[in-house]
Image (spheres, rainbow, N blue to C red):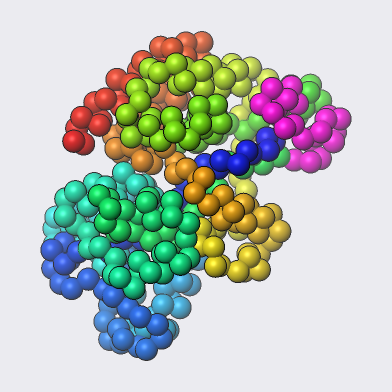
């Protein structure tokens, strides 16, 4: 329901990495345009997708095969891409290319020497087609390893115009108005909010949007790299604000799934007409227009032990907070303890 400010929070679900020769046991793949340069070769691509998303990505691979002559094989890793791909690399059976959802995994792979830097041609393409922030998020120690293929706009709050009309309220433009509108919708007999707390990663998105809006991009960046502790007053404030929603037993967790579209590109030269509907088109437009004000999903920048593991770290602690939001300060302390342990283990 809320209108976003100029700073957007975006979580990217496809960072394309080329694994280095030491990991693959052979030369990494490099392909140009439609010159059939890879005719007769096989390119193995690993990614998290299954089901409909995998079928859609297969169309991309088929187009790649048609242009280059290469045969493609897709390996679905599921959510735990770091563990699955890591085990394949250690076993000498690494894929040629891996699509990863987390900057933290990019850093992990780079530190282990598993990645090959992108070619000069690829870097020129990134410079020409993406805002500089995307190059930063694809780099480790000023070396570019990743190209962003797909992004998810995580600052959009979806709502039903009919539900608001039935309750007699206008779309709110502030968080306080959001809560008021939600209570009015609830009083009209409809569930007001879908928090979707069964998965911990969804709660990190709620927190990150509130935190970014309140604390600003500089503190957001500092917290994302653990240069700022989770016990900072700004974290407690954001949790307190979020708790106002969580503690109201009338914003019930409805089961809502929006399946239309499902693909956005941060590439500024992708024709907006390529998107299948006006909503997706406008969302993609705002993503590109954000330029360097984009901020990557905070939990995805953290070590997986803190920001990307089911039943542990930030995911579990925010689920606990959803169940009982009465102690924001105590939750902040638990988050800091978990973060400190994970970042120490990474270093």
Looking at the picture, does residue 79 appear above or below residue 224? below
Which quadrant would the C terminus be assigned to in this image? top left
User: Which segment is the magenta one?
Assistant: 160-182
Residue 332 position within the rendered picture, expressed as x and y whole percent measured from the top left: 40, 18
Q: In this rendering, would 121 be left or right of 265?
A: left
Residue at 43% across, 55% down: 132
The one nearer the camera, 78 or 66, is: 66
Residue at 21% across, 36% down: 346
Residue at 43% across, 29% down: 219
Residue at 62% across, 52% down: 286
- Magenta stretch encompasses residue 168: yes
Residue 324 position within the rendered picture, expressed as x and y whole percent measured from the top left: 50, 15
Does residue 44 show up?
no
Looking at the picture, does residue 321 appear above or below residue 295? above
Residue 216 position within the rendered picture, expressed as x and y whole percent measured from the top left: 51, 31
Which quadrant would the N terminus be assigned to in this image? top right
Looking at the picture, does residue 220 appear above or below residue 179? below
Prevailing secondary structure class for the magenta stretch in the rendered image:
helix
- Magenta stretch encompasses residue 167: yes
The one nearer the camera, 291 or 287, is: 291
Looking at the picture, does residue 203 appear above or below residue 121? above
């Amino acid at each position: 329901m809320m209108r976003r400010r100029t700073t957007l929070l975006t979580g990217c679900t496809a960072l394309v990495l080329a694994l280095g020769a030491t990991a693959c046991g052979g030369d990494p793949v490099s392909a140009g345009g439609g010159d059939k340069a890879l005719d007769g070769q096989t390119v193995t691509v690993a990614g998290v997708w299954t089901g409909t998303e995998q079928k859609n990505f297969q169309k991309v691979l088929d187009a790649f095969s048609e242009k280059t002559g290469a045969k493609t094989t897709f390996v679905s890793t599921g959510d735990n891409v770091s563990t699955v791909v890591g085990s394949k690399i250690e076993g000498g059976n690494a894929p040629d290319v891996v699509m990863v959802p987390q900057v933290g995994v990019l850093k992990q792979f780079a530190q282990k020497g598993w990645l090959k830097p992108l070619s000069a041609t690829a870097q020129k393409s990134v410079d020409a087609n993406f805002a500089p922030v995307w190059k930063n998020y694809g780099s480790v120690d000023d070396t570019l390893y990743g190209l962003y293929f797909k992004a998810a706009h995580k600052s959009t709050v979806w709502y039903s115009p009919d539900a608001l009309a039935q309750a007699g309220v206008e779309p709110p433009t502030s968080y306080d108005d959001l809560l008021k509108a939600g209570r009015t919708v609830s009083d009209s007999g409809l569930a007001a909010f879908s928090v979707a707390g069964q998965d911990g990663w969804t709660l990190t998105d709620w927190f990150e949007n509130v935190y970014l809006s309140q604390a600003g991009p500089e503190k957001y960046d500092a917290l994302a790299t653990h240069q700022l502790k989770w016990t900072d007053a700004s974290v407690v404030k954001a949790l307190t604000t979020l708790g106002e929603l969580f503690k109201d037993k009338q914003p019930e967790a409805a089961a809502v799934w929006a399946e239309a579209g499902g693909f956005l590109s941060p590439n500024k030269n992708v024709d907006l007409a390529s998107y299948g509907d006006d909503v997706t088109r406008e969302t993609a437009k705002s993503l590109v227009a954000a330029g360097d004000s984009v901020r990557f999903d905070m939990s995805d920048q953290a070590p997986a032990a803190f920001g990307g593991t089911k039943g542990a770290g930030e995911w579990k602690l925010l689920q606990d907070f959803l169940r009982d939001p009465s102690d924001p300060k105590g939750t902040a302390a638990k988050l800091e303890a978990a973060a400190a342990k994970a970042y120490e283990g990474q270093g």
